Image (spheres, rainbow, N blue to C red):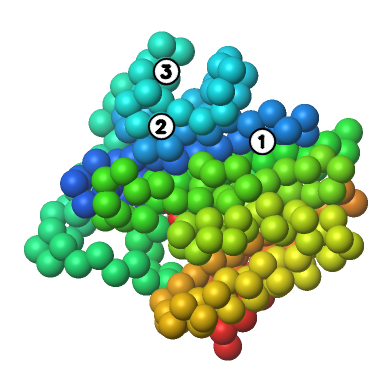
Amino acid sequence: MKIPEGDPNERSVGYGGRPDRDGRVTLDSCIMDEFSNIGSVACLEHIKHPISVARAVMEKTPHVMLVGDGALQFALSQGFKKENLLVEASEKEWKEWLKTSEYLPKANIENHDTIGMIALDSHGNLSGACTTSGMAFKMHGRVGDSPIIGAGLYVDNEIGAATATGHGEEVIRITGCHLVVELMRQGKSPQKACEEAVARIVKLTKNRGKELKDIQVGFIALNKKGQYGSYCIQSGFNYAVNDNSGNKLIDAAYYLK
Ligand code: GLY
């Protein structure tokens, strides 16, 4: 996770992440371990590795979430370096965007993404982490699902783990990853649990009179037995699996054909 966060060419997380509409790169991240220890930062500026700050919140504070300047001050107190995260390519795109200042998040247009990881270790313990720069050109202060435990990430070491990508507002609306884990608790496979969570978003979107074609949400899930699954609203989402058989990149199944 720290590799893409530190890569200026990876434009959806960390250093190089796309800015908000004021040209500020604000980062969201969270982490959860097998003991249900949690840590999170939201709207954090100037720190290349928000996931490491989230981990420090988990390990070194009595709290679970720090936001904005409080998160930055905490990071600096822990020795993190203050840096400019707005790379030239992102600044150029933002200046281009300013010409219209039209904020219309569209599914799969590369204006946002998230990196989520869920893991089952050799002791059979589950954990996870999630990081993003959020929607490009969002309102300053906007927070998506990725730093919200239960929305962008959830781990229950007895059951399974899930993480999400896509439009955070839709994931928050159904407390997505907590829902996926609870569905696995009821006996659903990781695949079926992801499908049911997506079905709930589909239903709510239609009920609210919104266009499904403009929305993308994807979930990945992993259970205690090491079974995994994924589902999203529309095509364009893939995920990487690393297990005893090696590495593979899988195109996720999707709802909108
Ligand atoms: N899923 C990332 C975000 O909406 O910010």
* Quadrant position of the C terminus in the picture: bottom right
Residue type (three-letter) at the residue carrying disc 2: Val
Residue sitting at 54 percent across and 66 percent down? Answer: 217
What element does badge 1 sit on?
strand
Q: Indicate whether 194 appears above or below 177.
A: below
What element does badge 2 sit on?
strand
Residue topped by disc 3: 74
Residue sitting at 51 percent across and 47 percent down? Answer: 146
Residue 46: image quadrant is top left
| Mark sitting on residue 144 | none
Is 167 positioned to the left or the right of 116 in the image? left
Is 213 positioned to the left or the right of 241 in the image? left
Q: Residues within 10 Å of mark 2 (few under 14, many from 20)?
A: many
Residue 100: tell me if it is visible. Answer: yes
Q: Which badge, 3 or 1, is on the more N-terminal residue?
A: 1
Say whether marks 1 and 2 touch (CB < 8 Å): no
Q: Estimate the x, y position of residue 108 in percent, counting from the top left.
A: 43, 70
What element does badge 3 sit on?
helix
Residue topped by disc 1: 32
Residue type (three-letter) at the residue carrying disc 1: Met
Q: Estimate the x, y position of residue 158 in percent, counting from the top left.
A: 86, 43
Residue type (three-letter) at the residue carrying disc 3: Phe
Q: Indicate whether 67 appears above or below 191.
A: above
Residue 246: tell me if it is visible. Answer: no
Q: Residues within 10 Å of mark 3 (few under 14, many from 20)?
A: some
Residue topped by disc 2: 67
Say whether marks 3 and 1 touch (CB < 8 Å): no
Q: Which badge, 1 or 2, is on the more N-terminal residue?
A: 1
Q: Estimate the x, y position of residue 105 in percent, counting from the top left.
A: 34, 67
Measure the alpha-carbon separation of dots 3 and 1: 19 Å
85 or 202, nearer to the observer: 202
111 or 59, nearer to the observer: 59
